[in-house]
Image: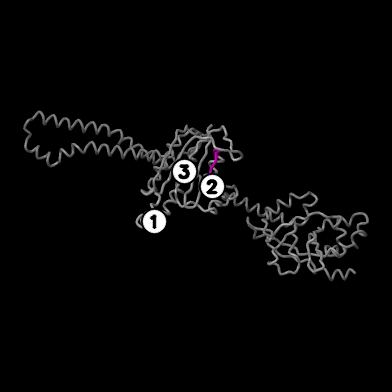
Amino acid sequence: MLDEHHDQVSPPRLMEGSIFDLGLASTLGDLSLYEFQVSVSCVGIVVAQIFERYPLVPGVILVEESPDGNSRFVGMISRRQLLEFLIRPQGMKLFLQKPLHVLYSYARNSPLILSEDTPIVSAAQQALRRLPELRSDPVVVEIDPQSSSSASLPYRLLDVNELNLANWQIRGIETQVRYERMQTQIVQIEKMASLGRLVDGVAHEILDPVGFIWGNLTHISTYSESLIELISAYEQHFSKIPLDIQQLKEEIEFEYIQQDIPQIVNSIQAGAERLKNLATSLQNFCYIDEVHQKPADIHTNLEGILLLLKSRISSEIRVIKNYDHIPPVTCYIGQLNQVFMNILINAIDALISQASTQQWARKYRETKNKVPVPEPTIEITTEVRSPKTKLSTERTPQRWVSIRISDNGSGMSWDQQQKIIESFSTQKRLEKETSLAQSYQIVTAKHGGQFLMQSEPGIGTQFEILLPLV
């Protein structure tokens, strides 16, 4: 009888995997899996003898033959369960010579069944959440039938020790990747801090001569006016001007100089003022935040960033500023400047990318269809308001400062928006650090605010930053 069952049972087969080529995205299909299936009508001694012959096989998958000749999955008995039942009093007599369905009726429990596409880290977490007495049992892995050349059901067994070993290896790889990424970020932060100090020093060196120019312009203006008055007094006192002086005045175009000197002084003052504002904006943008937050004027910093980006904002892009009266916001202004810069650069890039297309479309539509093309526009709106909460439609008593930066560019598709939203999560942000993900982290984690995005293809994109007023 035993020989007959031995002939019906195929020996276990190991589908080799590799724990040396694992990565963060590895799945259960990359591990070594056992193919061992028997019918529930097979007697227990046959499986016990196979377990004795193959000590590494963690269990057996039970199948049942239907009248139409097809097989169906019934369950799984682990090596541990079989041995535990056999060492019970009268266990040899009760289970060894009986069909396996008798033993399974006593040991019935739901095995952990996972697909071969399940990530190893996720599978290890699910395996650890099982009952303590089941944590050493193998995991049933459901494979793709098309990838298997075997005629058996697409179920394989994964030794939990193999799973844990692979999980620990991946955790080590993940820790190493995080450590290397952290080291890279530290280096980048140090570089940015050094660059910030360098730019701040350059801005300071610019401001010093600008201060000299600005301080002396007043004296130059006063002195020039005094000299012109003195010359006028000489002309009034002497009724007859000598011929050589008259010729000299004509050669140097004295009347033109007399009119142009005030304009030259005003132009120098305007240039010095612009240079002073640019250097001040550089200092504000490169401001290194201290340990504690400090009150800051949001409007002043927005104006400084717009001044720094003036070279990138072409004459075709119009900037609309809807500034409301808002109080100073307690924040890390250096980090918020980076957020404003990131959003504005995204808006400028979106508008510039379609500038040539819009220029052609404007020319074509205005001449052919008489339909004007919208002018590329960036709109900045600030206000104090109480936003609606996510859980209810009632307004909260807390006040927030809202900074909305919108553009009328081409907008983003739904897939693009989903990718950006996914990058806001911690896991995705670790995989790929983007400027918007970094901005989300600064606003939400550093300031306890909200970072909202809204985009519609063909209409434009809007980012809203909500900062709580303390």
Mark 2: which secondary structure? helix
Residue drawn at x 24%, y 33% as measured from the top left: 221
Nearest to the eye among marks 1 and 2: give it.
1
Nearer the observer, 228 or 216: 228
User: How far apart in space, not on screen, are marks 1 and 2 (Cα)?
Assistant: 34 Å
Is 86 magenta? The answer is no
Residue at the disc numbered 2: 437
Residue type, mark 1 in image = Ala
Residue drawn at x 74%, y 50% as measured from the top left: 128
Nearest to the eye among marks 3 and 2: give it.
3
Q: Which mark is residue 306?
A: none
- In the visual, does 327 lie left or right of 13? left
Earlier-in-chain disc, 1 versus 2: 1
Residue at the disc numbered 1: 361
Percent across and percent down for residue 179 are: 59, 49
Q: For label 1, count other residues whose C-alpha is less than 10 Å away and answer few (under 14), some (14-19) or many (20+).
A: some
- In the visual, does 182 lie left or right of 144? left
Stretch in magenta: 446-454
User: Splitting the image into 4 quarters, where does residue 11 fall?
Assistant: bottom right
Q: Which mark is residue 405?
A: 3
Compared with 73, 390 (above or below) is above
Percent across and percent down for residue 425 are: 59, 47
Mark 3: which secondary structure? strand
Nearer the observer, 151 or 83: 151
Percent across and percent down for residue 246 are: 9, 38
